[in-house]
Amino acid sequence: MSKFRLKMSRLKGEQVASQFGFEALPIDPFKIAEDESIVVEAKKPDREGMSGCIVFNDDGVGIIYATHIRSEGFRRFTVAHELGHYFLEGHPEEILKTAPVHFSKAG
């Protein structure tokens, strides 16, 4: 990711956090999703292969996050990352050009 895109993504994240009442750390991505009516569900720990995904469908938006990595910080990061796909201007439309779901993977 270019430095410009990284900076713009960070600024958008700060703007969204502020919009939802978070002016300082910690920021609760689960609360932001709830306030935006995004369903968030944990993936079963025995189902490896992705860190998270965001799904766009006629009923709304959903986020699934991995639980096979036993780190609350990793889970919060994953939900925040998927929210980035939702809040970045034009990004949901780009995802929907190819499929209603976007998968994210990490080590």
Image: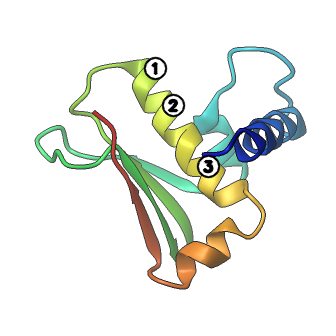
Residue 28 position, x and y percent, is: 64, 28
Q: Residue at x 55, y 42 (%)?
A: 81
The CA span between labels 3 and 2 is: 10 Å
**Circles 2, 1 touching at the beta carbon (< 8 Å):** yes
Q: Secondary structure at mark 3?
A: helix
In this rendered view, identify the residue nearer to me: 54 or 36.
54
Q: Residue at x 61, y 76 (%)?
A: 94
The disc at residue 77 is 2
- Which residue has dot 3 on it? 83
Sequence order check: which comes first, mark 3 or mark 2?
A: 2
Neighbour class for label 3 at 10 Å: few (<14), some, many (≥20)?
many
Q: Secondary structure at mark 2?
A: helix
Does the image show residue 37? no
Q: Secondary structure at mark 1?
A: helix
- Which residue has dot 1 on it? 73
The CA span between labels 3 and 1 is: 15 Å
Extreme residue in the top direction: 25
Image quadrant assignment for residue 60: bottom right
